[in-house]
Amino acid sequence: MTGTLSIDATKCTGCRLCETVCAVTKSGKVNPRYARIRVVRLEARDKPYFPVVHGHGFVTSHSHALHTRPDLELIFEEFSSLTPCDTCEGDPECARACEAGVLKYQELASGSAVD
Amino acid sequence: MAFQGKLALIDLSDRSVSIKEIPTTLREKFLGGRGLDAYLLYNHVPPACDPLGPANVLIVSSGLIGGLIASSSGRSHIMAKSPLTGFVGSSNIGGYFAPELRFAGFDHLIIKGKASSPSYLWIHDGEIELRDATGLWGKDVFETQRTIERELQDTGVQTLCIGPAGEKLVRFATIMTGFKNAAGRTGMGAVMGSKNLKAIVARGRGGIEIDNPREAIAYNKSINKQILSTKIGSIMQKWGTLFIYGATNPMGFVRTNNFLSNQLEDGEGLEAENIEEVLVGHGACFGCQVHCRSRYLLKEGRFAGTYAEGPEYSSQGAFGSMVGCRDLNTVLACNHLVNREGIDTLETGNMIAWAMELFEKGIITRADTDGIDLHFGNDHAVIEMVERIAARTGFGSVLAEGPLRAAQAVGRGSEYYLVQVKGMSNLHSDERPTPALALGIATSSRGADHIRSRPGIDVYNLPLAVLERVYRDNPAPYSGPIVNRMDSYEGKAWMVVWQEHNYMAVDALGVCKFHTVFMSPNLPSFPEFSKLVALNTGLSLTPLQIWDAANRSYTLERMFNIREGLTRAHDTLPERYFTVPTPAGSPMARGKCIDRGKFERMLDEYYELHEWDAAGVPTRRLLKRLGIDSEPSHLL
């Protein structure tokens, strides 16, 4: 299955449930740091929470907003030890848990690449 | 195992740390969070100690399922002997701290002694360091957290801290995290300040293995669906707790001008809808799908352009109806100030409202108030007094001592005008029309209080079948009456006892009270708690065993209070509840007093249901049955 997670950060309330269910599903351990998704807290007051997904091009697409965060390196470092997101084979647990509708699995057209 | 977190005993005086395993037997008896804290409080606080002296003990904890796969499992609990009341000090706080504490390896902290200079605790991956906080002393709540994040070069740390009010030992100072999450009641921030402890900071990489992750995720999803399917759940997503005012003010449950009325006339300015003008979004605590925390930008006045979060219903009353103000902007400004400085919104509003009633009656004058005009409805004066209380300036320092000490300082019969029980002021609610709610504030272990025993659903006059489903044999057997009239005295003692157990269980598990039977009958209680505990921790506790654990902890809170001098006479209401009828409101609320004779009989019934004697002392038989007849047992 070829697809990605689409993220509507404007709906994110920062609860981190996506991180928790991802961490426990993929690593067997509860702690958001073992998740392949991370809710980054930004200084922007209108949109302070910004979920990013390991392996889905988070640096290129959101780099401007993310670089306002001083410890971005730490997120890179923690992500680098983890396997990239595999979208739970098209049925991502994080999206199923998020009642706010921030995360959705999105099929990609045949031939397009996941960045 | 999911409850592998340890207990750390920290002595700030000699900078020693001792780390202990928490025996599973104590988990089964007291769960965690507030439940196990009650055990630790009874065991570690020396009788009759000075609450602001080094002998007092500050206890910080996560709940049994804190940080795990459960709705809003980010609650932390704080306990100590209260500098406000001299009885149980206890306060619960949302946010993200408790999970981080667990990930760092600790479920409970016991903090004793006093640091020789301002310090903060840095807890990370099983290590505990006491660090210098000289540069943080004097900083407000927001700046303290930002500075610590910069110092540690990590915005992922979670911080509990005090503001300047805690440093100045305001007796109702809070412990804060984020912009608005507050361990607000009973002055826990003053205890922290008395120990020269500015903050507790946690960060952890530890992963917690839970018993049945797949089923836990599925069950949590069904619980979230259940919560969001209730009217309370969906309306809180929009307005937080501010919506409550729209129901309680028309009914006549809203204390106005301290205690002069039970309804604010022309009070539309305080309606929840007004916050939409300043709202920029909502925030959630850890794992919560309700996200009731409003995020707003102040638009008017001295703080225009300032970002803040909240306010809760309690602030709407504290800086609205109670002080006779009708402008939500005043509420928003004061909410920002109490969070920034670290003082309890409710106690602060109550102290100002009380002073205003004294001022209106001529009992105090400008000569007492540093020249400030304390007439009801003076928005400017309310904001000014909040700042003066937090900074302990002039008359503000008198009010910063809390109700009983302030009344003693003012004299002139002023104590009569307080709206407090056991030395802690009440919510801006008026319980004269509702005997069940009145019994709740009279008996709560931490003083006048609306979230320790309040049967909130009693005011809806729900169909009897609904109340039977909630209160009958769920899970403890009950064969007495259940009555669905809010003005009845019959069957209400049981509702209060049931809610005490329910809220204790919630606080011991480390989840949120808005996700249980509080304002809706259709939210989780003991059967759901039992399943959440099993799926997350593997501990097999029946709903009745969880009830018994809650009973054990509540009884120990009572024992602590009795050891500190509590008697039946403390389980009462302000005199005016018995003698002055409500002047306003709906027919169900107007012209009501609490009948003293019926109240005393209700109190007798409440004691009997608890298996306490007529003086309110737990019986030997009860203590033996609960296995707490040899406390303090010093197992931890």
Image (cartoon, rainbow, N blue to C red):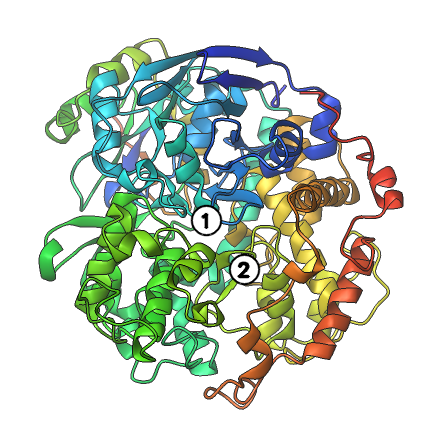
Query: What secondary structure is marked by label 1?
Result: helix
> Residue B32, relative to residue B245: is it above or below?
above
Q: CA distance from mark 2 to mark 1?
A: 10 Å
Q: Position of residue B518 (x, y in %)?
A: 57, 59
Nearest the eye: B535 or B577:
B577
Q: Residue at x 71, y 59 (%)?
A: B568
Side of A2 where B477 appears, left or right: right
Side of B91 where B370 appears, left or right: left
Determine the chain carrying the residue at label 2. B
Which residue in the structure is indicated by mark 2? B448
> Residue B440, relative to residue B134: is it above or below?
below
Around disc 2, counting alpha carbons within 10 Å, would you say few (fewer than 14), some (14 to 19), or many (20 or more)? Answer: many
Nearest the eye: B14 or B182:
B14
Nearest the eye: B457 or B26:
B26
Side of B86 where B474 appears, left or right: right
Q: Residue at x 54, y 59 (%)?
A: B448
Question: In the picture, which quadrant includes the C terminus of chain B?
Answer: top right
Residue B586 appears anywhere in the view: yes
Q: Position of residue A59 (x, y in %)?
A: 18, 22
Amino acid type at image mark 1? Arg
Which residue in the structure is indicated by mark 1? B185
Query: What secondary structure is marked by label 2?
Result: loop
Residue B491 appears anywhere in the view: no
> Residue A60, relative to residue B277: is it above or below?
above
Determine the chain carrying the residue at label 1. B
